[in-house]
Amino acid sequence: MIRAEDISQAKRFGALAFLLVAYFFYAWSWNTVDILRPYIKDSLGLTLTQSGSLYTLQAIGAIVGAVIMGQVADKIGRRNALIISMIGYGGFLLSGLAVTNYTALIGQRFGLGFFLGSMFPIAVGIYSGLFAKAIRGKIAGIVFATYNAAVAALSFLSAAAFRNGYDWSVLLWAGAVPVVLAIFALIVIPDDRKMVPFDGTDDAPTTAQSSAPVTELFKTGVAKQTLLLALMTGLNFLAYQCFNGWGTTFLKEDRGIPDTAVGDVWGWLLIGQLVGSLFWGWIGDRYGRRVVGWGFIGAALIVPVYLFVPMSIRALEATGIAYGIMLSASVVWGPWLSELYPPHLRSTAASIFNWGRVVSMLAPLVTGELAKIYDLPIIMSAASVAFIAAAIIWFRLPETVGVKPQH
């Protein structure tokens, strides 16, 4: 056994760099369901409801993947689980190139979701073990910034692809990168099964001993906390799907922005998320995890401005940046979830993040149907209510900064 603090800083940050690459392509793969939604819809002749169901299918896969692979990671090691996930999500993204009908699309999106759902808990388990609590928020901010950089890249490159006459499907070839790189995790990522993590003790288990680690999250004393966390993350995903999920469709069909510019306008919102993730990560380390909940209040106030106030493309971009900054408050959830439970449950606890998709997975289907009756901006504005409800729960949960960790 080796202690995390005894591993050289160069090796720990090298592991983080590899994790960031994996996370970049995870984010790219996940967000094809939103950013490419109008183009997948047109390409396969889908209805609005069918195109909305893509997120639902992917979310169902993510919930299953998070629950199963979060526990697998805590039992076989997060590094080994990372390899499985990278090959899985990369392979399923590539399989999208062979999809020619809605039936095949259902299988592709569910399989993709399964392996994507496992990435967040695995990543949190790895970086929470390698770095001290005092800088985990900043590390989470860097990880989340990478996520948003990938989504911004996907947005900007989708616009560039259209300008240069390429089909949207060329963007799916990115799945080849994680498949090729996965095996290098054995060299770059320390074996967490043989490492005492930060906040761990020599006599505490580094991996889960229970056959079903998830049951430990429902023991007396933490069951209510677990349920509130799941509801909070669910409201976040509900808000995200109501607003972000239909964002490019709103810009294309309601604002009348051409295909060659939609990706650029949406990309600036994602740049805001990138900046916000670094900002809120710093705030979370300095002032605590709960105070960051005010970001969701800010997001709730900006949503109606974006949807209903007439503005130029430049003003839309500026408003999108502000919204993106506020939305990124959830960056502290990764380290927060891992700190609220014992170290051997880091990935299982972090999987709660994806449990929240149970609340939101039907949102695209429901909003797609409601959009036939009401204007899409009215449906999207429900995000404000969800953000406020999530913030109320957020402020009621325990603080971990300045609190002795559990063992």
Image (tube, rainbow, N blue to C red):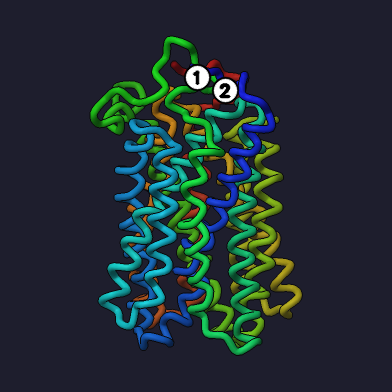
Q: Is residue 382 visible?
A: no
CB-based contact (under 8 Å), mark 2 and mark 1: yes
Q: Residue at x 38, y 48 (%)?
A: 84
Dot 1 corresponds to which residue? 196
Q: Position of residue 354 (x, y in %)?
A: 40, 48
Question: Residue type at mark 2?
Answer: Ala
Which quadrant of the figure contains the C terminus? top left
Q: Residue at x 62, y 19 (%)?
A: 6
378 and 337: which is toward the camera: 337
Q: Residue at x 40, y 50 (%)?
A: 85
- What secondary structure is marked by label 1? strand
Q: What's the mark number on residue 108?
A: none
Q: Is residue 116 visible?
A: yes
Q: Position of residue 233 (x, y in %)?
A: 44, 47
- Judged from this view, the residue extending furthest toward the top is 203
**Total numbered circles:** 2
Instruction: Place residue 52 in its image quadrant.
Output: bottom left
Q: Position of residue 132 (x, y in %)?
A: 61, 25
Question: Residue type at mark 1?
Answer: Val
Q: What's the mark number on residue 4?
A: 2
- What secondary structure is marked by label 2? helix
Q: Position of residue 11 (x, y in %)?
A: 64, 32
State how far apart marks 2 and 1 are (Cα).
6 Å
Instruction: Place residue 363 in its image quadrant.
Output: bottom left
Q: Residue at x 49, y 57 (%)?
A: 180
Along the horizontal axis of the image, is 45 left or right of 280?
left
- Sequence-earlier tag: 2 or 1: 2
293 and 241: which is toward the camera: 241
